Amino acid sequence: MGYLDYVNTKMGTDSVMSLSRGNTLPLCQLPFGMCAFCPQTEIPKDFTWFYNPNKDYIEGVRLTHQPSPWIGDYGPLLFSVAKDEYGKPPKQKFTSETLKPHYIKYELDSGTTLEFTPSERGGAFIASSKEGGAFFSIFSVFGNTTFKLTGDILYVKNDYTEKSEALNFTQHTVISLRGAKIGKIDIKNGSCHVFFKGKISGAIAISYISYEQAVLELSRIEKLDKTLKKAEDVWENYLSKIEIDSQNQTQVGVFYSCMYRSFLFPHKAYEITGDGQSLHYSPFTGRVHKGVRYTDYGFWDTYRTSVPLFAMVARDDLEKMLEGFLCDYYESGFLPRWTSLGEIGCMPSTLIDGAIAEAVCQGVGSRGLHKGLLEGMLHHANTLSSVPKFGRNHIDKYLKYGYVPYTCANESINLSLDFAYGDWCIAKVAKMLGENDIANEYFKRAKTYKALFDTERGFFIAKDENGEFRPDFDPFVWGYDYTESSAYQNIFGAPHALDEIATMLGGSEKAICKLDEIFNTAPVFKHGRYGCEIHEMTEMANAPKGLGQCAISNQPSFTIPFLYSYFGNREKSDYYVKKIATECFTKDAYPGDEDNGSMSAWYIFATIGKFPICPGSGKWAITTPLAKFKILGE
């Protein structure tokens, strides 16, 4: 068996808005590829939960970029094959379904078949009909879509973006219709229907730059069998970067499903010219620029686990990503925060700081690249953007008071702690570059977290402009001063200051007692600013008994189970890490939103028994591995 045989791309897909088991899609895509293919069962009222694994029908296969249902899609197109021409995508039952990272195949009860395999910026496909003719249809999912047929190539334009602002954005898609006997072609109402007999063996390529670039990319895509073999080889290479040896086949399946999920995002958003030059469309300028670009990525979610995993086994990819993030800084004025084509800024803070510090700490990238990134870090550490989705919100208040007062902003604790950690990251990068004056300044700024820690109650508690703690503090209240969490999940919320937090609690033994309090306190929550029960609350309450306030369904709790080991009690870390890995992760589900590979990377680190306790520090919490392993791509 190859590694691909263990991957379940449906893991995490059985999710709804009120309860996440991953909120994933069964994406057929190359690692970090520019686009993916995915079955679409329907478009519900909320638009973005478009795949339901419990349905026995599909509307077609979608070309998608969607990183999360909370973010949405851009440039989507839907491909269908049916016996009749429909004004909207027909729901067709399937008799056979194959969903792999490198291959999708549906045999439909109408006697038609649809197959896809991915390339870097598109893919190859086959649409076939057993008896008589059929219609191969392309539907516009959202936005303005135009179609034009020239020879056997269909030219498609789409300008849709769900949330981001993207200046002059157009996705140019070209589709070759090879091999079949083509009959009438009907273009109407945002759809195109091609009548054919036999089998279309075609290819699809996209470009954000031009049709000419898309046609060039199309010329690089071979027929399905050869493209499939290339995709298989690429995936086997990535999946083999960590090899585990276990007799538990469920564990092996979950592990390699997590490996697959770890290498989907960010998406490449650059293209290669005929002479090998990298170019990209910039959503910030609306123009084409030299260099690489990556998108569909959020650092609030990924800096803790995904980036350290890349620094371990995908270093060349991480270096290119950093080059792309630097391009965003030069073109938008700020380093990226959460991009989906353009910047959407849906989560707070500039936790790209942690990603950069980890890469520099692990020696990924050149000195020149590091200097450029440091410039971008310093900029957002001192400059308040006039557009809230860029940079550090309320940085002016942080610079004035040494923290963000709760009377000035929501989520003030997480903003303040993230800014302090970000300043520490700046200091680390500056020190490695020999910029000692900058390093000293920002190491000093990184200690501002101390002002918000109440040593009597043992929590980070918000303050007002006068330095007074919030009078109505309640550790069970979510929102207000905390991001998707309460005070419990943020007790150790300054990763660069774990030793100092332990000292403020009374020492390592007291820190371990505080961890016991987290796990032994019932998973009680109060809605707070959210005004209703959000899915993260539900997932914490529904977690296996004994996890208490460790809301492992969300990123703020990722580090908590490993902290026992860090503070000297490895046995308790072993217990909780194993409990979470075996009871919260199943072959079909994650404990909560998977988010850009971050939760998958958590499981990988849990399996190999080491966790990046503070990205940028080089420190690891060590636990007992859950399986024998070998890191081949390190």
Image: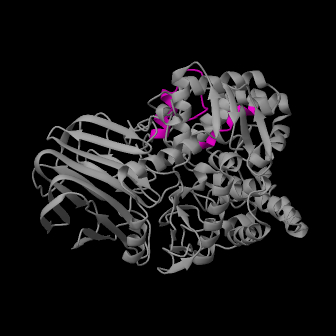
- Quarter of the image where one finds residue 205: bottom left
Q: Which residues are magenta?
A: 535-563
Q: Nearer the viewer, residue 447 or 354?
A: 354
Q: Quadrant of residue 206?
A: bottom left
Q: Nearer the viewer, residue 572 or 513?
A: 572
Which residue sits at x=80%, y=43%?
619
Quarter of the image with the C terminus is top right
Residue 485, position in %: x, y?
57, 42
Left or right side of 239 for 365: right
Residue 544 higher or lower than 156, as above or below: above
Q: Position of residue 142 (x, y in %)?
A: 28, 62
Q: Position of residue 519 (x, y in %)?
A: 65, 26
Question: Looking at the picture, how far across and down is residue 173, in whole percent?
Answer: 34, 67
Q: Residue at x 48, y 73 (%)?
A: 283
Residue 145 highlighted magenta (yes or no): no
Relative height, residue 603 to residue 330 (above, below): above
- Quick check: 196 left or right of 371? left
Q: Determine the residue positioned at 52% across, 68% down.
A: 270
Residue farthest to the top, as pictured: 247
